Structure formats: C-alpha cells, structure tokens
Amino acid sequence: MTGGTVLSWQGLKRTLGTGVMQRGMYLRMHPEYSVVFCCFAGGRYSDRELADGTILYCGHNVPGKTTFSARLDQPLITKGGKLTQNALFLKAAQEAQAGTREAEPVRVFEKMAVGMWRDRGFFRLMGYREEEEDGRKVYRFILMPEVNIPLFPPSSGSSRQIPARIRALVWERDGGRCQECGSTQNLVFDHVIPVALGGAGTASNVQILCAGCNAAKSATIGWSK
C-alpha cells in the first residue's frame, strides 16, 4: 500500500501531540484510537504486510539488549507486575473477537528511514496469533485497513451528516492539516458552504479546519456551527 503523509520525527510528535514515544505500540495513546509504529525493512522485528493491505504486527520483546531479548518469549507482564502493551493489545483483540467491544481503531505509522515516518491511516485490531519463532513465543497482531473509522468525534450536529467514507477521502486529500493555517491539532470537519445554506456533506464541500479557524469562520459568517 502506498500513499499517506510523510512525517519527520518532530512532525510525528506534533501530529500525535506527545513528546514521549519509546515503544512501538500504544493502546489508546489518543483518546479515540491506539497507535502502532511498524517497519517492513527487517531488523529487530518482523512486521509483515499482506497483499490485501492487512498488517501482521510483531509484538514487543523483553526490554534489554537486542541480541538477548530476541531470544526470550515476548512478555505479557513487566518485572513490576504491570501489563505490557502486548497484553493490553491482546486483551483488546480478545474482547473484539468475543463481541464485548468494538474492534480497536489503530493509527499506523510506517518507518521509512531514520527519522522519517509515513502515516498509513487507520486500521482495525481484528485479532492476534501466538507463534513460535526461533524457539520463542511471539505475538502477531492482525491489523486490517479500515476507511470507515470516523477520524474525529462529531463536533456538532452538522458534522454528523458527513459520511465516514467522505471523511476518509477529505482526510487524505487535505493531508490531515487545517486548510487555513496548516495546524495538525484540534482538527474538525467543516462544511465550506454551511448546512443551513444548503451545503452538502460531499467531499467537494468538506474541508479540515482546526478549532480556532473553524470558530473564526463561524464568527465571520455570523453563527456558530
């Protein structure tokens, strides 16, 4: 799969609104979705992408030196007795398979080179596999592409009229940035022509704005969206 915004490490941190990213997977790093950083170039982990776009994401090794940790079973509990990210993702996958929760939305970033990442968009955590690899147990999390995940919660009644399919198209077209100031924070979907004036929820009439630019536009028009 190709496409997606390419980000520097600093751009990645601005996009996610955090400066602390020391692991490759985070359950609910964002209030609305989880985050995975994958790499298909080999090395320490063996992430794989299938022909249909499904990603088989390799879980975390035991913290420590690469040559040592790569010989041990991937852990579910830390030395301090806390659940690892492997365990948190596994639990979410099990609950989705049991029908007790919706399949977790996961935003995937692919490592392209040192300090360079591609935003691959949104996937669903559909399941997991326990596998033997080189004499140890590893976890592979099954991430399936999903263009119908609402990228942001509705900010008003009008935004709910924008189909998820249109939101996905607009997100890709606008590069996940405010079309006025370029911000990647506090983004909302905006009707160029307001619904009250007959504006439709079509890709040509929807854009991404940050909350500040959206409020400024509403004030200029004379009402709040």
Image (spheres, rainbow, N blue to C red):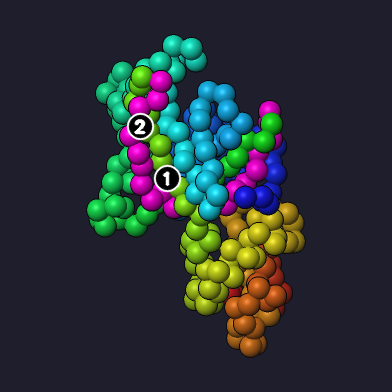
Does the magenta stretch mainly form a helix, a strand or a loop?
strand
Which percent across, then down, holds residue 45? 51, 27
Mark 2 neighbour class, 10 Å CA radius: few under 14, some 14 to 19, many 20 or more: few
29 in relation to 176, above or below: above
- The answer to which quarter of the image holds residue 128 is top left
Is residue 116 left or right of 76 when viewed as pictured?
right
Which percent across, then down, holds residue 41? 61, 31
Helix, strand or loop status at disc 1: strand
Instruction: Identify residue for label 1.
Output: 142
Confirm whether residue 122 shows in the render: no
- Residue 169 in the magenta stretch? The answer is no
Magenta extent: 114-134
Identity of the residue furthest to the bottom in this view: 198
Label of residue 210 in the image: none
Label of residue 131 in the image: 2
Closer to the chain start, of discs 1 and 2, is 2
